[in-house]
Image: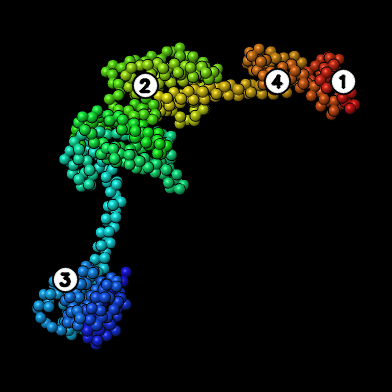
């Protein structure tokens, strides 16, 4: 950016000499004007910014002293160099009053003037850099303020600051939290409402949605209750709510209204964990822990819930759960038979037993379900089920138990898993059946010449029960073993009748039959003509 200089001197020869004999562009300075008196110079100062004022003391209409005062008012950072032919101390004193950087006596050389002008320019550019740095620092501070604010509030709710430090940090960031009693709420959207980041477009839709949720909560609380709202660390929103001594510990009605408001405004179901009202800033951490603990009990209560910590039923000695082996046996039998209704019924009975146990901690529930899965999957393993064939090598059903958000989710998830295993067993059995029948067909195509080829011999070859193999063969091929063998022999005979001069009796033996008359009768029954007629046609 160019440094701008204004010259004011009533002597024409001085003005022209300074204007024309100085290499202004070479010094990086723009001479914006050369005024013949202070009044004209002041008008020029009013027209735009000026960085350096080079002015004489004695001028008509407005002298240099008055001009300097007005210039300082218009441009507080202007650099002033006073020119005078009078070597009097009072003028120097007056020049100092308005912070003139230099008082030069006439006459002076071009070199002397160039040095003082370049010095003034250096101060101007130095001031600009300092001002630019300050503005950049302020901008960065403003941009980082929300992050700094959330960092301090996060430390507060996590209990990593004492009362005194918390007060100092909050005051330094101008965070208003002046009450004596506080409760913490944790608002968390249900999992299927938060979209994943769009890496291709660089847009994190989930983060934007959480910002919208935070703004909506702030707007809701603004006229209802003094509260600080900020983004938590685990895709949730934290509210520090000021409470009164006479209030109940959970302030239940207001968060219920908040939950309804968020759903109406954003179409977003949320659950809210409510910590109890605590005394002082140091009590906030305790209320926050309670809110998170309450939120965990969404696992039992279900999604889209408001859960006060004092609604949680803590038992010193919770009931023990016994999952009957009969349920597991019936479940695995239903899986193997493809009985989806049976799978659902047995799982419903297992979860009913767990829900009926008083005061059972969530961790215990998940442990019971892991034990249940271990027994059920071990029984299915003995039936040939391999989970890696269904879900891949990385699948861990026990880890999946830990990630279900609610009991209903777990029940649906396990129902789906066992149904998928049942489908796999059915498909695998079908594949095995198709594989066996394919082997049987291939065996017939190769050994049809054997006269005593029978279903007994073939089932023995395949190491299968004869009656079971007979049913499977008809189910897969749409005909009995005998019918398929007959069709195969007739097709081979037709090929020989068309392509060879072999006699019918020879062909009879070639296709595994010993009676030419029976062969001819059978051939006509299948094709509509006897072997001789077929050859002639």
Query: How far apart are the two marked residues, 3 and 4, measured between alpha carbons?
Result: 111 Å
Numbered disc 2: secondary structure: helix
- Residue 233 visible in the snapshot: no
Nearer the observer, 347 or 516: 347
Which x, y percent locates residue 14? 23, 85
User: Residues at badges 3 and 1 in contact (C-beta under 8 Å)?
Assistant: no
Q: Is residue 495 above or below residue 480?
A: below
Query: How far apart are the two marked residues, 3 and 1, measured between alpha carbons?
Result: 131 Å
Where the C terminus falls, by quadrant?
top right
Is 324 situated left or right of 424 in this image? Answer: left
> Which of label 2 and label 3 is nearer to you?
3
Query: How far apart are the two marked residues, 4 and 1, measured between alpha carbons?
Result: 26 Å
- Residue beneath label 1, please? 530
- Residue beneath label 2, please? 365
Q: Residue at x 83, y 18 (%)?
A: 525
**Residue 478, numbered circle:** 4
Nearer the observer, 274 or 267: 267
Which x, y percent locates residue 515? 83, 14
> Which of label 2 and label 1 is nearer to you?
2
Q: Residue at x 28, y 27 (%)?
A: 309
Numbered disc 1: secondary structure: loop
């Amino acid at each position: 950016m160019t440094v701008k200089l204004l010259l004011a001197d009533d002597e024409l020869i001085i003005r022209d000499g300074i204007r024309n004999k100085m290499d202004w562009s070479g010094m990086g300075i723009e001479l914006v004007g050369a005024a013949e008196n202070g009044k004209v110079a002041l008008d020029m100062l009013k027209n735009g910014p000026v960085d350096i004022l080079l002015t004489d003391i004695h001028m008509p209409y407005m002298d240099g002293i008055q001009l300097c005062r007005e210039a300082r008012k218009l441009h507080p950072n202007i650099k002033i160099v006073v020119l005078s032919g009078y070597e009097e101390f009072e003028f120097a004193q007056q020049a100092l009053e308005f912070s003139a950087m230099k008082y030069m006596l006439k006459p002076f050389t071009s070199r002397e003037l160039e040095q003082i002008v370049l010095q003034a320019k250096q101060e101007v550019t130095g001031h600009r850099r300092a001002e630019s740095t300050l503005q950049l620092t302020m901008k960065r501070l403003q941009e980082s303020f929300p992050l700094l604010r959330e960092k301090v509030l996060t430390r507060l709710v996590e209990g990593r600051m004492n009362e005194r430090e918390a007060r100092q940090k909050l005051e330094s960031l101008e965070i208003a939290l002046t009450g004596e009693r506080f409760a913490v709420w944790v608002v968390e959207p249900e999992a299927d409402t938060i979209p994943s980041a769009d890496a291709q477009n660089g847009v994190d839709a989930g983060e934007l949605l959480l910002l919208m949720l935070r703004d909506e909560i702030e707007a809701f609380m603004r006229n209802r209750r003094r509260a600080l709202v900020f983004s938590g660390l685990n895709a949730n929103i934290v509210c520090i709510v000021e409470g009164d001594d006479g209030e109940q510990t959970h302030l239940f009605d207001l968060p219920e209204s908040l939950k309804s408001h968020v759903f109406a405004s954003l179409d977003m179901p949320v659950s809210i964990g409510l910590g109890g009202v605590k005394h002082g800033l140091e009590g906030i951490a305790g209320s926050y822990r309670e809110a998170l603990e309450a939120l965990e009990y969404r696992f039992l209560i279900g999604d889209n819930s408001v859960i006060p910590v004092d609604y949680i039923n803590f038992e010193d000695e919770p009931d023990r759960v016994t999952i009957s082996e009969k349920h597991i046996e019936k479940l695995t039998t239903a899986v193997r038979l493809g009985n989806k209704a049976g799978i659902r019924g047995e799982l419903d009975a297992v979860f009913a037993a767990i829900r009926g146990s008083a005061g059972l901690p969530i961790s215990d529930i998940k442990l019971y379900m892991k034990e249940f899965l271990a027994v059920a999957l071990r029984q299915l393993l003995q039936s040939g089920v391999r989970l890696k064939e269904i879900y891949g090598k990385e699948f861990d059903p026990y880890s999946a138990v830990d990630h279900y958000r609610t009991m209903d989710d777990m029940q649906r998830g396990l129902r789906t898993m066992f149904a998928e295993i049942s489908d796999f067993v059915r498909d695998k059995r079908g594949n095995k059946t198709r594989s066996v029948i394919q082997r049987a067909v291939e065996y017939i195509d190769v050994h049809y010449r054997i006269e005593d080829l029978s279903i007994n011999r073939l089932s023995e070859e395949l190491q299968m029960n004869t009656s079971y193999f007979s049913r499977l063969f008809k189910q897969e091929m749409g005909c009995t073993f005998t019918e398929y063998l007959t069709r195969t022999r007739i097709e081979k005979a037709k090929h020989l009748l068309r392509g060879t001069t072999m006699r019918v009796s020879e062909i009879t033996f070639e296709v595994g039959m010993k009676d030419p008359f029976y062969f001819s009768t059978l051939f006509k029954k299948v094709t509509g003509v006897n072997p001789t007629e077929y050859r002639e046609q």
